[in-house]
Image (cartoon, rainbow, N blue to C red):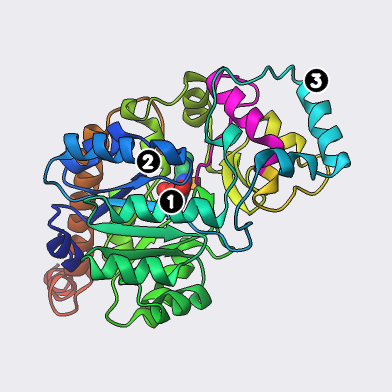
Amino acid sequence: MRTPICERLGIKYPIFGFSHSIDVIVAIAEAGGFPVLGLAREEPDQLLTIIKHVEERIGSKPYGIDIMLPANVPQQASLDDLRLSLPSEHVAFVDGLRKRFSVEPPTAASFFTTQVRSEAMFDEQTEAILGSNAVAVATAVGLRRDLIERAKRQGKMTFSLIGSVRHARKALEMGVEVLVAQGYDAGGHTGPVGTLSLVPQIVAVAGDTPVLAAGGIATGGQILAAIAMGAQGGWLGTLWLGAKENHTPSALLDRLINASSEDTVITRAHSGKPCRVVRSEWIDAWHEADAPIPLKMPLQQVLTGDVFSSIHQRNNNRLIYEAAGQSVFAINRETTISDQMNLLVHEMEVSWSRMKRCESKGRPGRDSEKTSAQQSSL
Ligand SMILES: Cc1cc2nc3c(=O)[nH]c(=O)nc-3n(C[C@H](O)[C@H](O)[C@H](O)COP(=O)(O)O)c2cc1C
């Protein structure tokens, strides 16, 4: 089951696991996958501490770091100034929702209550990544030529999450070394093309550049299918939310366990950009007829960041939501990363055997001949 990228990265299985949780990252590494630590929603002054904790626990096992680099954010941003610039219609709407759902203030500060995405923040994130021992750097929602070039000079492998052929070409032109073809099915920020249609198109333009498939993948059979389409592995995000190591708030875990793929929706209500999340009454309220169109990134999070923090910190079972893909179908109970990884590998083996059985049944001149010989002897 090992593909060339497994050899290059020194991992056992072609399973790439994105997570914001240190415990998930460590467990994926221990189980033979390639963990990718998300640092896009961590407070900048925490980055070095988080990286230090990961590296102390992960030892010499390889891991990657991921950040988001959306274009059109301010150079430098003051949260207070941006709050004052919010349109009054939006402020009134969110105040109305706070009252309607009795949303209480957050219990502690978080990225969403203290930070605004800006170029200055991306500079801080870049320096933290380049100072780490991560062997790979992934970026999503955008690209930065200087990060790619500096990371490559340090021997780090560069990955880019892309959702269209146009973005894949741009990433290749900038020298990105691995394309993560992330389809519409995915949790988080997505484009409009489904994974099954996207992967072959990206493989076709990628040439010798490895491609990974992301979006809606939560079984070993799907990872094998991605490899059959020319990808070198699967990149998964949602599945790990069902693992103990993710410390998912219980209200969110219940929601995920009870959700089907249809309960995930694309919304701009979370960040201002299209993002697939598991629905809740908060998300539904933004899709009612009288709701305003969400603001652009980063303003939507300036407007609603305190609510996102509050509903997570207070385990609000009516409103809690999170980025989640159509892959949520595979979260049926709380489990562990080790069980999830074992199951993925087992399913890959079962799917492989199934494909081999199809091959021997369908191969002309063998079973088919035998059948006709048997028939003629009757
Ligand atoms: C809770 C959550 C947060 C995510 N945050 C990010 C992020 O910060 N950066 C990123 O590149 N991708 C992020 N993603 C997307 C994943 O990297 C991955 O592409 C996606 O989860 C794959 O589809 P799946 O959710 O169906 O497995 C996030 C996904 C989830 C579920």
For label 2, the crowd category at 10 Å Cα-Cα, with few meaning under 14, some 14 to 19 and many 20 or more, is: some
Residue occupied by mark 3: 99
Which numbered circle lies on residue 124?
A: 1
Magenta stretch: includes residue 79: no
Instruction: Give the residue drawn at x 40%, y 39%.
Output: 330
Q: Are the residues at dot 3 and dot 1 in contact (C-beta closer than 8 Å)?
A: no
In this rendering, is residue 329 above or below 169?
A: above
User: In whole angstroms, how far apart are the C-alphas of marks 3 and 1?
Assistant: 37 Å
Q: Residue at x 73, y 43 (%)?
A: 81
Secondary structure beneath dot 3 equals helix
Q: Bounds of the magenta span? A: 301-325
Q: Is residue 23 above or below residue 348?
A: above
What distance separates the C-alpha of mark 2 from that of mark 3?
Answer: 35 Å
Q: Is residue 128 visible?
A: yes
Distance between the alpha carbons at the discs numbered 1 and 2: 9 Å
Point out the frontmost of discs 3 and 1: 1
Tell me the kind of residue under disc 1: Glu
Label 1: which secondary element: helix
Q: Quadrant of residue 284?
A: top right
* Nearer to us in this view, 19 or 116: 116
Task: Please state which amino acid type lies under the numbered disc 3.
Answer: Lys
Specify which label sits upstream in the sequence, 2 or 3.
2
Question: CB under 8 Å between callouts 1 and 2?
Answer: yes
- Classify residue 272 as left or right of residue 222: right
- SS assignment at label 2: helix
Indicate the amino acid at tag 2: Leu
List x then y, in percent, for residue 171: 43, 74
Circle 2 residue? 47
